[in-house]
Amino acid sequence: MKKLSILLCLLMVLAMTAMAEPAASPIHDGAAVLQPATLADARTLADRVWAATGLRLAVELRHFLGGADPAAYAQRLLAQQEDSADTLLLLVVVGEEAYAAASGATAERTLSREARDTLLSRSFRPAFQGRDYDGAVAGFLLGTARQLEASTGADIDLDGLFGRSQSQPLPSAAPTPASGTHKRIQLPNLNDILGEPISPTRDPGSARRQHEQEDRGLSIGSIIAIGFVLSMVFGGKKGKRGCGCGPLGWIFGVFGLSKFFGWRR
Amino acid sequence: MHKRSTAVLAFVLMIALIGASLLWGAYKGWSAERRQVETSMGTLEEVLSARREVGANILTVARRHLPASDPLLVSVQAALTDLNQSSALTRRAQANETLQAGMKNLLDELRQLPSLSADERDSMYVNQLLPQALEQSARMTEQAEYNLQAERFNRSFDTSFSGRLARLLGVERAEQFTPPEGSTP
């Protein structure tokens, strides 16, 4: 019995582990502008930074925000992140040519707002303005990793990421010239632009059925009450004036009348 | 004599009770139905929010290639403001129609611009992404659950006897998300 219980517990733990959904990647390219290699390297770097410093790096790319303010939107996205306090989030809005960053409370202690903004202006902005989105994201992430190494003393392995070796210098602050051919932009999922699919708040079919079941006009209780009242008023003792009907007769009579005149559905 | 007057009184009381039950039942039933229609207003708001977002996105791209004083740009901006600020459903429906026509014309105007043809990214937005978003949001607006429920409610409310009774007690028709008759976008 004891062995069976232990086996059952083990099976349950295994089942829960299997059913557990993998954590969503903090690097999300909703605009589909990054090369797959850049995306993969960004996720690898984010994992290494987290392992070395406890800081989570998140990047969110969109085409448009539908008129929302990028800074406020970045804060909302940050609040939705797992461990938002430890997260530094970069929001890149390709179609609006805008970007914003947001840091959780712990993340801001690790990498100050001034340092973050400096990184953005030196390592991200030039490439972003040149529409080199791969270069911009790579520059920001590499720059952040180097800054964290300097400030925390952690050792973060950057070798092989974004096509560079450890000895290579960081991307320069000079603006990269806009290339004659732009990267091919794939048509994204419209749900990223229009938000969640709209679903009615209530199934109209069930609402209709529920309404039809609700009493309109006379309810059963009303009919019974009226029947009793009529019985008391008109129903007399047997032999005396009055029809001699009991209350049931009056109730059924009112019920029939309500059906006939459509007082009750 | 006394018994006759009692009988008459009882009869009158019975009629009054039946009448009161009818009125109360009609009011209760139709009020509940109206509340249910208003609950689905949430879906209409979501759809209109999506419309506003598409409008804002088109304006973002348009401002890069057209001057701020461009008449179409100004018209779309005004329709967006109207859609945001008006409370009357008919007025918002009118603004929605104006917005739809304005956005379509603005995209057509943008396609003619050499500056847009030279910009691969914005060209993709104007030729593919934004028209698709515009069409999808227009379809969502047409199929908004609120309008279907309001139309159904009003049809039953106007034709039924209990609906007329409920109207005496202050229950009103549901306002529909349709522009006023005779209006042009």
Image (cartoon, coloured by chain):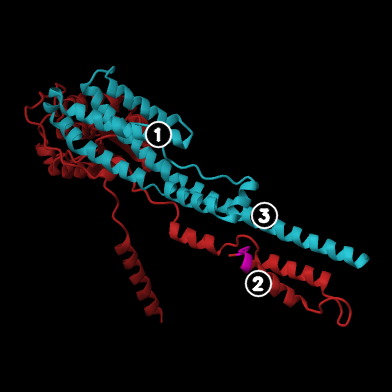
**Residue found 26% across the figure and 43% down from its top:** A190
| Above/below status of B158 relative to A205 | above
| Above/below status of B133 relative to A205 | above
Q: Which of marks 3 and 1 is nearer the N terminus?
A: 3
Corner quadrant of residue A1: bottom left
Which quadrant of the figure contains the C terminus of chain B? Answer: top left
3D distance between C-alphas at marks 3 and 2: 19 Å
Instruction: Tell me what hue chain B is rendered in.
Output: cyan
3D distance between C-alphas at marks 1 and 2: 49 Å
Q: Name the residue under label 1.
A: B182
Q: Name the residue under label 3.
A: B23
Question: Which is in the foreground here, disc 3 or disc 2?
Answer: 2
Q: In this view, does A44 lie to the left or right of B30?
A: left
- Amino acid type at image mark 2: Gly
Whether residue A225 appears in magenta in the rendering, the answer is no
Rate crowding at label 1 as few (under 14), some (14 to 19) or many (20 or more) other CA atoms within 10 Å.
few
Which one is in front, B136 or A163?
Answer: B136
Q: Where is residue A126 in the image (x, y as percent from the top left)?
A: 18, 24
Q: Can residue A74 be seen in this view?
A: no
